[in-house]
Image (tube, coloured by chain):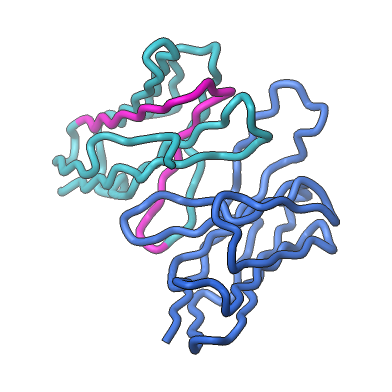
Amino acid sequence: DGGITQSPKYLFRKEGQNVTLSCEQNLNHDAMYWYRQDPGQGLRLIYYSQIVNDFQKGDIAEGYSVSREKKESFPLTVTSAQKNPTAFYLCASSPGTSGMLGASYEQFFGPGTRLTVL
Amino acid sequence: SQQGEEDPQALSIQEGENATMNCSYKTSINNLQWYRQNSGRGLVHLILIRSNEREKHSGRLRVTLDTSKKSSSLLITASRAADTASYFCATVRTDSWGKLQFGAGTQVVVTP
């Protein structure tokens, strides 16, 4: 988990409320990602950002929003439009790959935030 | 849909035994990576194998890649109780910028 922090570790939310999950990295990585993991399943990509002030939708972006105003930070907002938000959320980062031949795209993960909607 | 599919879904072995798990994928890839996840924690990168490589070793880990069959295997030799975790393969597709696509994982339990 070194170099990437997520907070809080556990989060409880009432239905209809928006909530923001924090992700910070001190690895000087250009790219950052948000994933959702449901019990017994793999990770699904919500949003990703290749560089500051730019981000793209992943496979399951509906009901989520992000911002990338600083290289170190990539917060995720789970909105009330997300129908089934209870899940384990993981943030990751990777070194910049633009123009780098053979870049590995290895990703470094934070410890995760478990969100429960009551 | 999941790009990588691991097999088996679960594996139970005793300390000292070898653990083998497989991953199949559907499209052309740039590389394939294996990650480990301890319960309730983030993922940890184990090893990466590029599409032009066939086998790679790292400590007690051995990974193979067969691009003709679109499959990979991860072997953990001389398993330890600390190897108990879920293992995921993830692929980087050739038509996709740096995005990893994960399978559902293999849950490995190593009993002392």
Lateral position of residue B98 relative to residue A40, left or right: right
Residue A1 in view (yes/no): no
Inspect the magenta stretch and tell me whether residue A16 lies in it: no
Whether residue A109 sits left or right of residue B62 in the image: it is: right
Q: Is residue A84 above or below residue B15?
A: below
- Above or below — where is A61 with respect to B109? below
Residue B57 located left or right of residue B108: right
Instruction: Give residue A58's position: percent from left, percent from top.
Output: 61, 50
In the rendered image of this protein, which colour is used for chain A?
A: blue
| Front residue of A60 and B107 | A60
Q: If the image is split into quadrants, where does the N terminus of chain B sit?
A: top left
Image: magenta residue range: B18-40
Q: Residue at x 51, y 41 (%)?
A: B45
Please tell me which residue lies in front, B52 or A111. Answer: B52
Q: Chain B: give its colour.
A: cyan
Where residue A33 appears, as percent x and y from the top left, is 64, 52
Dominant SS type (magenta): strand
Q: How many marks?
A: 0
Residue located 49% across and 86% down the image: A15
**Left or right: A29, with A116 as reference point:** right
Coordinates of residue A91 in the picture (x, y in percent): 59, 58
Res A114 visible: yes
Q: Quadrant of residue B92?
A: top right
The residue drawn where x is 37% and y is 14% is B69
A85 or A10, which is in the foreground?
Answer: A85
Which residue sits at x=49%, y=51%?
A: A44
